[in-house]
Image (cartoon, helix red, strand yellow):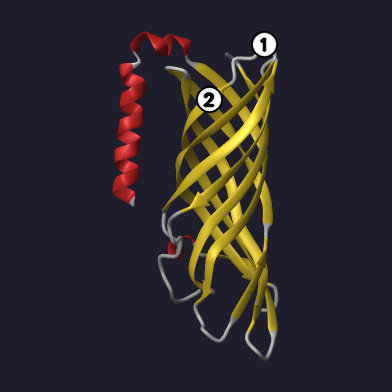
Amino acid sequence: MRRIFGIGLVLLVSSVLMAGPAAAQMGFGIKGGLNIASLNDLKSIDTIDQLEQESKTGFVGGVHLKFPLGVFKLQVEGLYSLKGAKGTSHNGLSSEPWETKLTYIEVPLLLKYELPTPALKPFFYGGASVAFLMKAEKRNERIDTDWVDITDNLKSTDYGLVVGAGIGVFGITLEGRYTHGLEDTVESKTGDMLVDEAKNKTWSVMAGFDFN
């Protein structure tokens, strides 16, 4: 999987470099909003435990660059993204609330199509993302009332697929997207970890402004 993403990154960057004069038409934008995150394929490290979870909200925001690519645009983003989840662990004797907080620097690479309408401009996009873990914490409200650092227990890099759509008017944009994590985020299956497997799953809503 990592090799596939590496090849895709090289191809996308090569496309930008081969665009030549099109780089002069590069666009720039900023955006910010809300992540609604949860963990997919969630499995407890203890087979007796049953994990229930609900989504967790967190900030997402950053900048993007757009490069003309035929009728499409190649959009490269740099985002500060808060993910994670919260829920309850049941082991037959007790129920323990838990919560995780994951901080990523995320780099989506998107192929974007903007409808050529005069003012109101709908757009659609899809692509891939690579995310670099900055910090990870967890707490159990009965045992660990304070946050416990579990950064070393998780993989430093995550990969995902991205689809989204939005609308722009006079440079102001509003968009929604879904990012489906492909990588099991758990590196160490012992110690402070509550789960044996978990993948990021994130819905995002953002507003922004394009300076192009």
Distance (Cα) linking label 2 and label 1: 15 Å
Label 1, secondary structure: give it: loop
Could you tell me how many numbered marks the image carries? 2
Q: Hey, what amino acid is under mark 2?
A: Tyr
Q: Is residue 87 left or right of residue 138?
A: right
Q: Tell me residue 140's x, y (percent).
A: 65, 73
Q: Residues within 10 Å of mark 1 (few under 14, many from 20)?
A: few
Of labels 2 and 1, earlier in sequence is: 2
Q: Tell me residue 105's x, y (percent).
A: 50, 43
Q: Tell me residue 153's x, y (percent).
A: 45, 65
Residue at the image position 47 percent from the left and 45 percent from the top: 161
Residue 4 is at least partly visible in this image: yes
Label 2, secondary structure: give it: strand
**Residue 119 falls in which quadrant of the image?**
top right
Q: Which mark is residue 51?
A: none
Q: Hey, what amino acid is under mark 1?
A: Pro
Q: Which mark is residue 118?
A: 1
Task: Give the camera-side residue of 116 and 21.
Answer: 116
Residue at the image position 50 percent from the left and 64 percent from the top: 198
Give the vertical position of 169 relative to 130 (above or below).
above
Q: Quadrant of the C terminus?
A: top right
Q: Is residue 160 left or right of residue 61?
A: left
Task: Give the camera-side residue of 167 and 185.
Answer: 167
Residue 193 is at least partly visible in this image: no
Task: Give the camera-side residue of 9 and 134.
Answer: 9
Find disc 2 in the rendering and name its residue. 113
Give the vertical position of 57 relative to 20 (above or below).
below
